[in-house]
Amino acid sequence: MLTRRAVARAAVSGVVAVVVALAVAGPGLAAPPPPPNPGDSEISASRADADAKAARVGELTGQLTQAEARLQELTDDVSYKMELANKARVDLETAQAEAAKALADAESAKVEADAAGKAVEDSRRDLDEFAAASYQQGSTIGSISAYFGATSPEDLLARAQLLEAVSGSSLNAMDQIERSRTEMANKDSAARAALDVANRKQAAADEAKKAADDAQAVAVLAQQNQAGQAALIRESKASVESQLAEALGAVDGLTAQRAQYDQWAADKQREDDENARRAAEAASAQQVEEEDDAPAVQAQRPQPVQSAPSGDGVEIAISRAMAYIGTRYSWGGGNYNGPTVGIRDGGVGDSYGDYYSVGFDCSGLMMYAFAGAGVYIPHYSGYQYNSGRKVPLNQAQRGDMLFWGPGGGTHVALYLGGGMMVEAPYSGSSVRVSPVRYGGIMPYATRLL
């Protein structure tokens, strides 16, 4: 039986025999014409052009890095301003509810005060009618003037007794009603004072919302302008990179032409024989290597996800959030019951149609997740940051909330353990699981369960 090496030698001998046979077959095979031979100056100029374009690519790369870093800063600022707008919207809704209650209380107090005043007027009218009737009938109980003109002590005593009878009934009743009217008037005044306070709070909240909306609009405009600048730099870089590829291709082409010419100038027959020998040896060596060497593949074990330390509530919250993986991001979307139609933000969210699309924003996803465990938090990441117990970031556990930005007001996500989190990131994206981003993260996590 022939060995592999013997077979390889036989194959090489066969190739050599074929080459020799072709060489002695006669003048029927003409040598090919020489390939192009570019000059040194042409090759140098081509390389200089490629070097210039490479330098330009490096310059644009630096500009793009700076532009994208600035764009990320502005994008974070937009997220922060959007959450502040969320806060202002929540505060305005609270102030409007307080003002509506204060208005209802004031209207109720006014109705009671008006009723008390009417009762006093009715009682006074009845007493005046009684006094007038008494006067017309010659009675002495019409008014206090009955004391004057008495003709004797007995007459005076009779008149006093009659007046006392009147004051003991109608006059006392009227005084009681008058006191009630005073109390109702005081209540009406207090209610209206409370309404004034509530109206001022509502006006302040409305102004705060307008200011937040304006600040958000400015941030969005700056982010859009920076995105446009970054896009222009990115397009320029892509164009120059394409030109660089062409220039490098030209250099390679000229170099290859020179190499082809040098190769043609050599002894073609000897070079062909040498190439055939090398090709046979290389093929034989590769075949032996492929048969003798068997690479081992060792699977890597994935890092286990940290188990829940705080009971079923954590897993309920996580499972509710994970159930909506792939659901689109909608700014202002999401509540305790699930995804909702978003609201207008005057910029990025509107450009993606968040205000007419059903989905979650970052704090809306947290609202829905924890509602399943009986924990109800407001629709603003800054408030959510302060809604539970703070734990150092390096002690965060599965089910804790992670926050970014001043006061946690830029972004919030739910920690899954093992360096992973579930989040609703930004307009144009969807709910997803991703590695924890530590740039700009708050040093504390918030634990609700």
Image (tube, grey):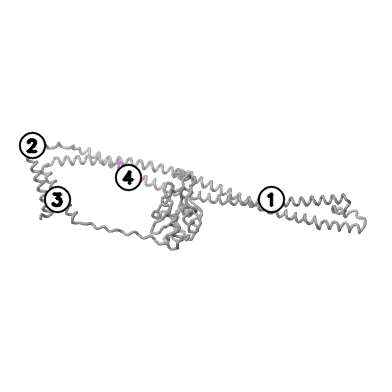
Disc 2 to disc 4, C-alpha distance: 56 Å
Q: Magenta stretch? A: 52-63
Frontmost of labels 1 and 4 is: 1
Is 170 on the left-hand or right-hand side of 383?
A: right
Frontmost of labels 2 and 4 is: 2
> What residue did someone put label 1 on?
111
From the viewer's side, name the closer residue of 421 and 267: 421
From the viewer's side, name the closer residue of 244 and 46: 244
Q: Quadrant of the N terminus?
A: bottom left
Q: Does the magenta portion include 61?
A: yes
- Whether residue 103 is situated above or below residue 399 in the rendered picture: above
Frontmost of labels 4 and 3 is: 3
CB under 8 Å between discs 2 and 4: no
Disc 4 to disc 3, C-alpha distance: 43 Å
For label 4, the SS is helix
Q: Residue 240's spot in the image, x, y percent?
A: 32, 40
Q: Does the magenta portion include 442?
A: no
Q: Which mark is residue 390?
A: none
Point 53% across, 46% down: residue: 211
